[in-house]
Amino acid sequence: MTVALIDSGFGLLSTAGWLRHLAPEVDLLLLLDPEGAPWGPKTASFVTDRLLAAAHLAVQRGAKAIVVPCNTATVTAIDVLRETFEPRIPVIGTVPAIKPAAATGQNLAVWATERTTASAYQERLIADFANGMPVAQIACPGLAEAIDHGDTAAAAEAIADAAERTPRNCDAVVLGCTHYPLVAPEILQSLPAGTALYDSAEAVARQVLRRTNRDGETGSRLGSIDVVLSGRPGHLPAGAHAYPVGRALATGARVPREALLSATTRAPATAPAI
């Protein structure tokens, strides 16, 4: 079975890594869009068109499920994707792990791209699950782009800026962009000791396996990992090797758990994926 993951850049790495760890027999098709990246500041029509083009290509390549491991793309275009492909092809989106984080009763901040921070969808998640508690919404301009470029200096600058704008009484930070777990250690270093981080990559991977009726199955075969770059066959960009999960995926082997657990706290496997 082939599962396609679509994102403009490295935001798909964590979810792909969890799928490779949980179900190494599944074939993965990783569709990145370096020519159109970053999607965050682009118009909704641009993001929708790029996402649909990649999804059609994935289905032509035999994908039996489509995963959008990108909060921005999910809030922008998941409905269009589902209208186009479901129920024949399951479409699984990604949302910030606000619900499980809020359930702890901790003071929360949500770090996300500017588009996701400004979205009605994130506002609705906070309204539905934060139980009236204040949630600091912290836009992180440039952080996802720095991660995609492997620019550690620019990433450190963006992280420091976001940390400076995060209230000091926050006990937990929800990583509302799928790129951010790749620099979780650096984010933790910028925050007060004991701050918890939440992301939803594992939950999304488990939702994919449930939707494809493979939950709990592990075969002996090791699946393939194919990469498409803006519609053309390719390889994971060199920048992906800057991150443990990127290096692990590049080998084609099963991704070890230690390459995935870089944050101190993650959303539980039952966290919402859509």
Image: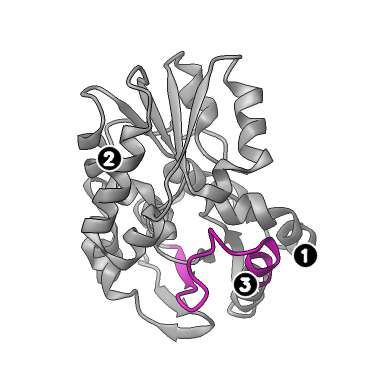
Dots 2, 1 in contact, CB < 8 A: no
| 2 or 1: tag closer to the N-terminus | 1
The C terminus sits in image quarter: top right
> Badge 3 local density, few (<14 within 10 Å), some, or many (20+)?
many
- Placement of 182 over or under 125, stated as above or below: below
Picture coordinates of residue 138, whole percent (x, y)? 45, 36
Q: Circle 2 is placed at which residue position?
A: 187
Q: Amino acid at mark 3?
A: Arg
Picture coordinates of residue 152, whole percent (x, y)? 22, 58
Q: Circle 3 is placed at which residue position?
A: 50
| Disc number for residue 84 | 1
Q: Amino acid at mark 1?
A: Thr
Residue 78: name its quadrant.
bottom right
Tell me what residue is drawn at x 27 percent, y 69 percent.
Answer: 239
| Disc number for residue 267 | none
Query: Label 1 to label 3, Cα distance in Å?
Result: 14 Å
| Magenta range | 26-50
- Judged by depth in the image, the label closer to the viewer, 3 or 2, is 2
- Along the line of sight, the residue nearer the viewer: 62 or 98: 98
Picture coordinates of residue 64, whole percent (x, y)? 61, 65
- Placement of 152 over or under 120, stated as above or below: below
Q: Amino acid at mark 2?
A: Ile
